[in-house]
Structures are given as structure tokens and as C-alpha cells.
Image: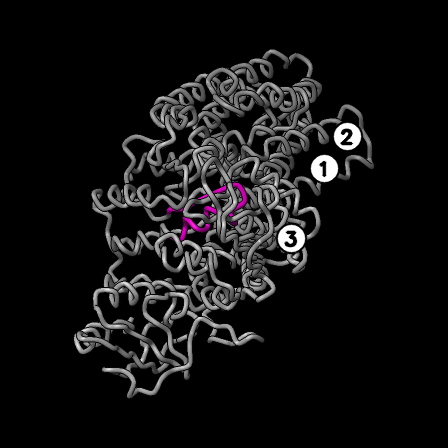
Amino acid sequence: MSAKQHVQSFGRTLSAMIMPNIGAFIAWGLITALFIPTGWFPNVALAKMVGPMLTYLLPLLIAYSGGKLIHGTRGGVMGVIVTMGVIVGTSIPMFLGAMACGPFAGWVIKKFDEIAEDYIPSGFEMLVNNFSIGILGSILAVIAYFVVGPIVSYLTNSLGEGVAFLAKHNILPLTSVFVEPAKILFLNNAINHGVFTPVGTQQVKETGKSILFLIEANPGAGLGLLCAYWFAGKGPAKQSAPGAIIIHFLGGIHEIYFPYVLMNPILIIGMICGGIANVTTLVLLHGGLVAPASPGSIFAVLAMVPKGGYFAVISAVVVAAVVSFVVNSILLKTLAKEEKSLDEASKKMSSMKSESKAPRAGVSRANFDFSSVKKIYTACDAGMGSSAMGAGILKKALKAHDLKHIKSGNLAITNLTSDIDIVITHESLTPLARKQLPNAYHVSLTNFMDKSTYEDLMVKLKSSGGKVSANVSADNDDNDDNEEEINAIVLKDSDIKLKGTATTKEEVLQEVAELLIKNNYVGENYKQAILDREKEITTYLGSGIAIPHGVRSAFETIKETGVVAIQYPNGVAWDGTEKAHLIFGIAAKSNEHTLVLQKVAELFDEENLRNSLINTQDVKMFTNFFNGNESENDSNGNTNSKPSKSHSQYDQTITITVKDSAGIHARPAALFSRSASNFTSAIFIEFDGKTAQSDSIGSILSLGIKQNDTIQIHANGSDATQALEALANHFDG
């Protein structure tokens, strides 16, 4: 990135902190102009709002916006906490501290979340999330109190000393080089009342007027800036400029234009030029005021003009406004030209729609640099269902293509953050995702389980020269990093319903909701939320699987995260000719359910296992598949494994230790079954006194075999020896 691009990026960051809060600045400006003692309608009680709004409200809003820009709501909250330390550590409005501490605090909590992500046990997410902000925020707030405050005080004193030196040596036009930047950082009162007022008052006693009262109070330069935005600006800044002009020029609240400079720092050049023009005109025409003009309204200024001095003062206001307007207009036009291509790309991106229902439709940006991708996320309305399963497929695709340096996951669309490079959404939600994250590369699909979309994306990433992190081994198999945490969400027997009674899709949704309610995962209102979700976008994924869940607005009705499963052996017509056989109902307060959904995703690859779950009469097959529990007989003794025979009844037997870190879960069981089918011999796995035949994935899973368990593999048949030799190392991981 070039130096120019860095500057532009910095400017956009400042703008993103300021622009959302312009309304708050205007509200403060109106209250100040109306109710302070020198305002239009003085009111002692209402004027009490002015100080707290300036000292606390506005800096904290900026800090929240800055933190949120870096790491969403968590970053915003962190930014507010840290900025409070800066505010109470100084006696001046801490806008500079807020603009520094907000993004920094957001960055700190973002890095913490990235580091801690893989170490938080499922079920402890909320505890860790809350205490991490509390602990880190309090530490940084204390540091900000003792470090940032003194730095700002030093800056204020330095600016004041610089102005005093220039005033003492009669180099007054150059005072604007210090005054204008100081004003933008809300240090204007410190300089005005700490330097200009004492010296100016002494000059009035000697000459009857002082130019120092107009160096900071002249509203001309600020008027020129706001008119430039009105003339050459764009977006919300252009639209809000006329209102700001009234508050600034007539109301005398100069602070209202400070954010307009902060969002484009290069405009400080125009303000300095306007200030120099103001002071130079006053020097040449011998202008000045008899007392400080407070607030800096044109009316207050004119009220303080000595007899015969109107021409000089009015000329200074006009000249300052014209110079500021011309210079700032040129700067704004220049910035607009430099960013024209970016704006055009953004407009084009916002107007694009999915051109077809093909999975590859919906790419939002041309000439996208795939080599710089660091984050890819799937997203849906609620972030708890189909996108979570898509995230599991995406994660495995990245591993398979040796792109493990790219972070992946899933979120609700409203929670997408600006650091995400690529967003994958259902085609009906892509416009909403683009609106939430306009600068990302967007991919639309019709089914989150369609692997061709992910494979196409992997090809683009690989062909762009995507680099693999040096400390990531390509030898890792496709075991999920979080596989061991699946036990944190346990599917209980009561979460499983065999042979559901519903005969229509609507009845299925009702049956799912009733099971979630019965198990105390949700309140009664969640039933309607599930129906509403299905009206928006189907939750049917294909291969006979559906994952009903509520709309995001029903979040408050969820009592705790839970997943239920209902089996329909004969199937229920869902969309058109498709029939759903396995229904997984979801209620999620956080993301701990995603590991269960990743297990559901495995069913798309394992037809035998899928059919076993569809037809089983034992809930243990469900719980063992999702939880990895050891086989337990129910009250009737029904399991999918059988008591083992004597070893002498088998032609060949080997004993091995399972090294796979996740034990024998769905994928290794399926691969073992597939490999065993290449031999004519009957092959069995024995563990803990029970055996399972190799052609039944469900029975293998029902054994509940974990890492370091010792098992026997038996074979009966003409190629028994060859079979066991081939299968001996199958569970090494």
C-alpha cells in the first residue's frame, strides 16, 4: 500500500468514527447555542447538559464507534471503558484520546479473541467474553488514566507556549499554525482563555482594542469550510453542512465544524490558510475587539467591535471565509478524484444482484485480490443454522487445499465485521450482506451444502498464489480442531424423537418447536419464530435433512442453547418433490451449537450412516453419533453392537490402539467401512465386550471408541489376512 493509500485509509477510519455521531454534535451545539448564559434563551438548568455532553457523551460515542469499527460491539464496549480512563485523567474534552483509545482498545480485544478462540471450552463462551472485556478494559483504563492524560496535558501546554511566543514577537499570522490544529483537537478554550484573553485584556487597557480576541473567535474560516462541504462534499457530510453553518456562524459554536476536519485531516491546511488570512487582514486594517466574543457568533463578534472598527472586522471575517472556502473546496475535489474509482466500485457493487440461481452467482467485486484474503465467513439471517453448517464445509475445504492460514467461521449478517474479506450467503440475503459489508467480496449460493461453490472459491484462492502459514503442517487430516469440544453440547435421549408423527412441513415445524419447548430450551413464542423463519428462507438443505430454527428477532425467547432431532422414516414433503427424513431443530444463544451442525454436515457424505439414522429404532445411535459416548444399553437392551464372539471363531484377529485424537467418529468410521467393503471377508470391530460389523457405520459409532482405546479387528474369509493388513493402521489419525 502506497503512502497516499495509507493516508486515505487513515482518513476513512477517522470519518467512520465521526460521521455516525454528527447528530450528537449538532444536538450539543443547539443546546449550547440556546441555553448557555450568553445564548439565545439562557437557562441555568438546561445549560447543565452542555458540560457533561462535551466531556463524556461525545468522546464516548467516538470511542464506541472507533472500537466497533475494529471488532464490532465488543470492540465498541472496550473502547468506551478505556476512554473513561482518559476522560477522568484530564480536565479538557478528550476527543483526541477517544479517537486513539477507541480503535486501540477494539484491536486489543480482537487479538485476545483470536488467541483465546481455540482454548475456550464450549459453554464457557459468555463467561470468558464478559470477563475478558472487564479485566482487560479495567487494566487499559488505568493505564490510559496515568499515561494518556499527561501526554495530552503536555501537548496543550506546548501549543499554548508556541502561541504565546509568536504573540510576544508580533508574528501574529503564524499563530494560526498552532491555533487551528488546537481547535480541531478541542484545545481551543485552553489557548483562547489561557493565552489570548489575559494578554488581550492588557492590550485593551493600553490601546482600547486587541486583535488577539479575534484570532480564535473569528467564525470566517469555519464558515468557509462548511460552505466547501456544502458545495464540493458528498454524502452525509454534504447534507448536514447547512445545519452546521447555522449553529456555527449564527450560534457561535465553532466545535460543530471540528468533526468535518477530523474526517479529512488534510483540510487542516485550508483552516490554517483561512486563519492566516484572518489575522493578516486584521493586522493590515488595524482591527480588533474590546472584549472576548463568547460564544464566537457573528453577532457576538459585532457586538464587541469598537467604534469605527466594523470595516476591519467584517473584512477579516469575509476574507477568512473566502480563503478557507477556496482552499478546502480544492482539497475536497482532489480527494474526490483520488477516490473516484473506489466510489464507482462501491456503487457498482451495491447495485449488483444475483443474476441467476447458480451457486457461483453473486460475486460483487471485479479484480479482487484473492492473495490478500485472511478471513472468509458464511452468514445468514440468524447465524445459527445453515451458515454454521456451511462454515464447517468451508473450514474443511480450506484445510484440504492447504489454506489453513485463512480464518473461517459464521455470523449473523448484522454481526459481520469490516475485517472480513469474503462473505458467503444465500442468494436471497446477499443484498443485505452487501449493505452490511460493502467492501467485501460476496458469493451467493442456493444451498450452503453445495460443495461446488466452496471448491470454486478454493481454486480462486490457490490460483492467486495464496500462501500457507509456515507453522501449519499440511499433513494434518480433516479432524476438526474443536472435535473434542463436542461433548460440551450433549444430545440427551429426550432430545431425540423417533418416528415423528407429522405428515406436512408445517406440522413438522410445530413438532420441532414443541420438543424444544418441552425440553425447556425456548419459550412458547419460539414456535412462531420457526414458522416465520421458514417463510423467509427454507431450512431444507437437501439429502433429506432440514434444520428449522427461529428468526433472529426471537433471540430473547431462547433460554439456553439446544438441538433436538426428529426422525421421519417415510419422509415428509418439504419443498416440491423433496422429502425430509432427519430434522434437527436449533435454538442457539451463542455459537456452541455449531459443532453439532458440523456433525450434521458429515451426513451429506455418508449415505449409509444417514440411512441408519433414518431407520434406527434406538436413540443411542443419535446420541453416540453426536456425543461420541460409549455404548450404553437402553432398558430393552437395544444397541447396534452385539456381544463379541470368542476369538477362535474368527479366521484372523489383530489388536490395535486407536491414535486418532477424536477417537472413531463419523468420518473414520465411514472410511473404515468403505475400505473394508473392498474385501470379500466379513470384518468386525470389537471393543469392551461388544462387536460391530464393518458395513454398519452406526454400529461402529455405537461402540463409543475414543483415543487410546484398545480394539480388536476380526476377519472371516479367504482374504482375511490381506484385509487386516490393509486396515491395521486405519485409526492412526
Q: Name the quadrant containing residue 203.
A: top right
687 sits left or right of 182 in the view: left
Nearest to viewer (mark 2 / mark 3): 3
Among the two numbered marks 2 and 3 on one chain, the one whose residue lies closer to the N terminus: 2
Among the two numbered marks 2 and 1 on one chain, the one whose residue lies closer to the N terminus: 2
Classify 533 as above or below 691.
above
Q: Which residues are magenta?
A: 376-392
Kind of residue indicated by mark 1: Val
Q: Residue at x 61, y 28 (%)?
A: 254
Q: CA distance from mark 2 to mark 3?
A: 47 Å
Residue 166 picture location, percent across and down: 49, 35
624 sits left or right of 694 in the view: right
Residue pointed to by mark 2? 35
Quadrant location of the C terminus? bottom left
Do residues under tags 2 and 1 come within 8 Å of each other at their CB atoms?
Answer: yes
Kind of residue indicated by mark 3: Ile
Do residues under tags 1 and 3 come within 8 Å of each other at their CB atoms?
Answer: no
Mark 1 burial class by Cα count in 10 Å: few <14, some 14-19, many 20+: some
Residue pointed to by mark 3? 558
Question: Tag 1's secondary structure?
Answer: helix
Residue pointed to by mark 1? 50
Q: Name the quadrant containing residue 499.
A: bottom right
Question: Tag 2's secondary structure?
Answer: helix
Kind of residue indicated by mark 2: Phe
Q: CA distance from mark 2 to mark 1?
A: 9 Å
